Image (cartoon, grey):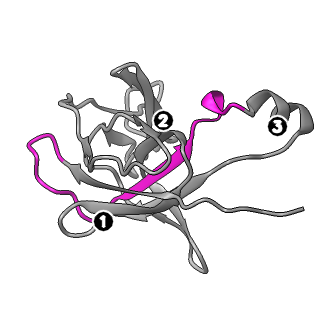
Amino acid sequence: GTFRLKSGVTVKGRALDAQGNPLAGLFVEIVRDRESSPDRELLESLGTSDEIRRSAETDTAGRFTFEPLAAGVYVVQLVEYQRVTGKGSKRHALPGVFAPRRLTIRGGETPNVLEIRAATSVVIEGGWIDSKGKPRRGSELMVIGQIDGQSWFLIVHPSADGRFSV
């Protein structure tokens, strides 16, 4: 058969804290939303993967760019971990709470610069204790929530004495 590749669309954006200051060195990921794919049922019945995923790291001005993508609906979000070729996974703790953003890409149209801004949030502090009330080392915990109808989660790594802050 013949394969015909269409030109994709480059997506650009900025990551900002809640006050609008740029955030450097954060990982951003864009993934096609499979639920919106017109071929979802057919591909699922065949056991075929049709994932489209790109990742980027923000520069000193908080800017990021994703290589060209096909038309479709995508979810864009800041993530703590990114796989780096030859180096395994790298982790950059997120400095706030960031809701995933849905983005619709239409063929031939360049989307506006996407802004991902930290949500105003509260700090939760706590710690693990034993049955006698003494601090103890604890396992990581997960905080799950919703912002603007989008789910998000954060994995918290307690200190050696079991204290954590979210």
Residue 65 figure quarter: bottom left
The residue lying toward the viewer, choosing from 166 and 131, is 166
- Badge 2 marks a residue whose secondary structure is strand
Q: Residue at x 39, y 19 (%)?
A: 149
Question: At which x and y percent is residue 13?
Answer: 29, 54
Q: Residues within 10 Å of mark 1 (few under 14, many from 20)?
A: some
Among numbered discs 2 and 1, the one appearing first in the sequence: 1
Image height check: is 54 above or below 47?
below
Q: Residue at x 68, y 48 (%)?
A: 51
Residues in magenta, as a range: 17-38
In space, the residues marked 2 and 3 are separated at their CA atoms by: 35 Å
**Which residue does the numbered mark 1 point to in the structure image?**
25
What kind of residue is marked 2? Answer: Leu
- Position of 157 with respect to 8 (left or right) is left
- Badge 3 marks a residue whose secondary structure is helix
**Which residue does the numbered mark 2 point to in the structure image?**
141
The residue lying toward the viewer, choosing from 51 and 141, is 51
Among numbered discs 3 and 1, the one appearing first in the sequence: 1
